[in-house]
Amino acid sequence: MNIKSAVFVKSIAGPDEILGDGIPQVAFIGRSNVGKSSVINTLVNIKNLARTSPTPGRTRTVNFFLINNSFYLVDLPGYGFAKASLEERQAIQKMIYWYLLFSGVDQRKIVLIIDAEIGPSDYDLDTIRQLTENNKNIVIVANKIDKIKKSALQKQLDKIQKQVGSTPIIPYSAEKKIGVNELIKEITNE
């Protein structure tokens, strides 16, 4: 399936009728500054669908985009932004977990984006554990592979795979558009 259309629908910060409208949802999560907006934009081939910013932590709501009139791509706030107050970081973390685990939505897929060079953070690993325990369907996008020397890439991907267990990983570069087709196949395949 190709992505032919992507339209912003709405932003929410709590319970809303969009959560129960029956349209499948694919959620995108990741640490602030991991390139989540860039991954989304390359995936849908629209430059500024998800707003990118040099300032990490700009997304503060749960944003819904209707893809091909058939499913929502759900852009969640980035977590771990150090310049936000502790109260703001906790509120964002609470919103993320509410949507993923307690909103009543059974997401078709949850796409966790990590920085391939850095690997998963402790928070990423904890998120994977909690999602796995709740039988969520997860795929990891190892973004920014273009920043790793080709000779070191496979070793780094193997290291990440060891850390995340059996969760599938898609090597990705929003910059060079590597992994786009694999991710489209993963999120559109029921």
Image: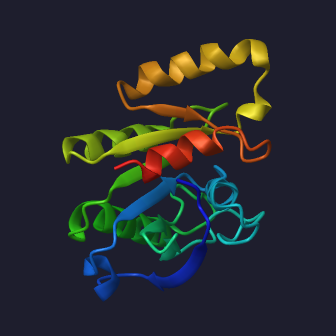
Q: How is the image coloured?
A: rainbow
Compare residues 10 and 179 and report the one nearer the observer: 179
Between residue 61 and residue 23, name the one nearer to us.
Answer: 23
* Position of 134 relative to 62 (above/below): above
Q: Where is residue 45 in the image (x, y as percent from the top left)?
A: 71, 61
Residue 61 at x, y = what percent?
49, 77
* Residue 16 visible to an observer of this rendering: no
Question: Quadrant location of residue 170?
Answer: top right
| Relative to 1, residue 163 above or below | above
Query: Along the horizontal axis of the image, is 186 left or right of 7?
Result: left
> Along the line of sight, which residue is nearer the eye, 188 or 82?
188
Residue at horizontal 43 percent and vertical 18 percent from the top:
162
Q: Where is residue 134 in the image (x, y as percent from the top left)?
A: 20, 48
Residue at the (30%, 39%) spot, across then down:
129
- Position of 112 with respect to 116 (left or right) is left
For the point 50% across and 74% down, the residue is 66
Specify the quadrant of the image occupied by residue 85. bottom right
Picture mark count: 0
Q: In this view, does 63 lie above or below 163?
A: below
Q: Which of 84 and 63 is in front in this view?
A: 63
Camera sees residue 36: yes
**Which residue corresponds to the image point at 24% horizontal and 71% vertical from the top-left?**
103
Question: In x, y percent, where is residue 166?
Answer: 35, 25
Find residue 3 and report its image quarter: bottom right
